[in-house]
Image: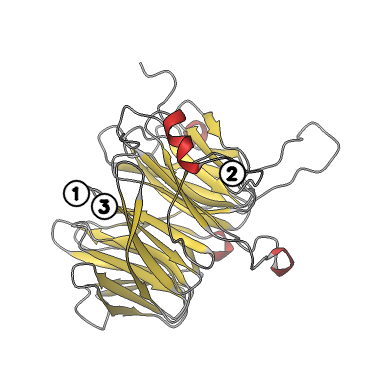
Amino acid sequence: MSLFGSTSGFGTGATSMFGSTTADNHNPMKDIEVTSPPDDSISCLAFSPPTLPGNFLIAGSWANDVRCWEVQDNGQTIPKAQQMHTGPVLDGCWSDDGSKVFTASCDKTAKMWDLNSNQAIQIAQHDAPVKTIHWIKAPNYSCVMTGSWDKTLKFWDTRSPTPMMTLQLPERCYCADVVHPMAAVATAERGLIVYQLENQPSEFRRIESPLKHQHRCVAIFKDKVNKPTGFALGSIEGRVAIHYINPPNPAKDNFTFKCHRSNGTNTSAPQDIYAVNGIAFHPVHGTLATVGSDGRFSFWDKDARTKLKTSEQLDQPISACCFNHNGNIFAYASSYDWSKGHEFYNPQKKNYIFLRNAAEELKPRNKK
């Protein structure tokens, strides 16, 4: 039975894989658990590109490691390999041909992991932890873009110890995304910069933040002809902004919406507000997923401005998420994000990565 085919869902056949359900709520959605998850908080998830046959998933963690699994069509996950940094891994991405994985770390370096030889070499250096890493594949160049808390954005061709280019950021880099020919970078103090990547990277526009609180995650979305046209930006205050770069009517087309908040808007009790830890756009439908410190994921249709689904609550935050290349698999990581400080940290609590069939739930409702 193919769990991740376009037709099958996780029907009754899939839930029986977990045997009898116990009372714990670490997996309330009864999704597939990835085997041998990291031993500390999971910072990032990324699926292999469509150029690779099959599906491979990488996860970076605060245990200083990056791990790679093969995800089979029946939902089985097979640990393939792992590599280490000397500090927590904060971000990871794939090369467009799927042969390499790039990782960014608190050890102030980025590494390139050649999956065929299983060797990893340092390809980048910053003066502070490296928070984001992205592969850029342009017609006339390819490189790795790193964003750091040293307030720089650097571009590396992976063969030279010196960057091809260094761009100054107004503040520490908190999150970034790349969909050629566009990059979006969000920084501390609510900085927001869009770059164009044609010929060579250059600053395109500085944008006044549509959000009033600290930036946490950003994801670029495309228009109907597959061109990057805007981005979704999440903050620590349970809110996401949808921002188009050149909308016909900015006041109407750009908007924000609340999410990852406890119910109780009409009650006198204060509302609990959680951070948005990750945003991912569905590669086929253009709908989006958000994950939060409240331990829930939600699926949204930004064009119809509707919520498609919210998960049951997990017993710890969801720290990262991603879709595979054809949008059939939604991966999300359950681990403590330190959003409530050290007193809520429980070293006994395990970390999990879950896989869910996303083929149906992310379809827009009223497809004309």
Task: Tell me the quarter of the image containing the N terminus.
Answer: top left
Q: Name the residue under label 2.
A: 296
Q: Which mark is residue 45?
A: none
In primary-sequence order, the first of circles 1 and 3 is 1
Looking at the image, which residue sits at the far top? 368
Residue 185 visible to an observer of this rendering:
no
Residue type at numbered disc 1: Pro
Q: How far apart are marks 1 and 3 (CA)?
A: 25 Å
Q: Is residue 50 above or below residue 319?
A: above
Cβ atoms at labels 1 and 2 below 8 Å apart: no
Give percent across and percent down for residue 2: 30, 35
Graded by Cα atoms within 10 Å as few (under 14), some (14 to 19) or many (20 or more), the crowding at tag 2 reads many
Q: Is residue 120 above or below residue 3?
A: below
Residue at the spot 40% in from the left edge and 32% down from the top edge: 248
Graded by Cα atoms within 10 Å as few (under 14), some (14 to 19) or many (20 or more), the crowding at tag 3 reads some
Q: Name the residue under label 3.
A: 181
Give percent across and percent down for residue 22: 62, 43
Q: Which mark is residue 53?
A: 1
Task: For marks 2 and 3, give the one nearer the viewer.
Answer: 2
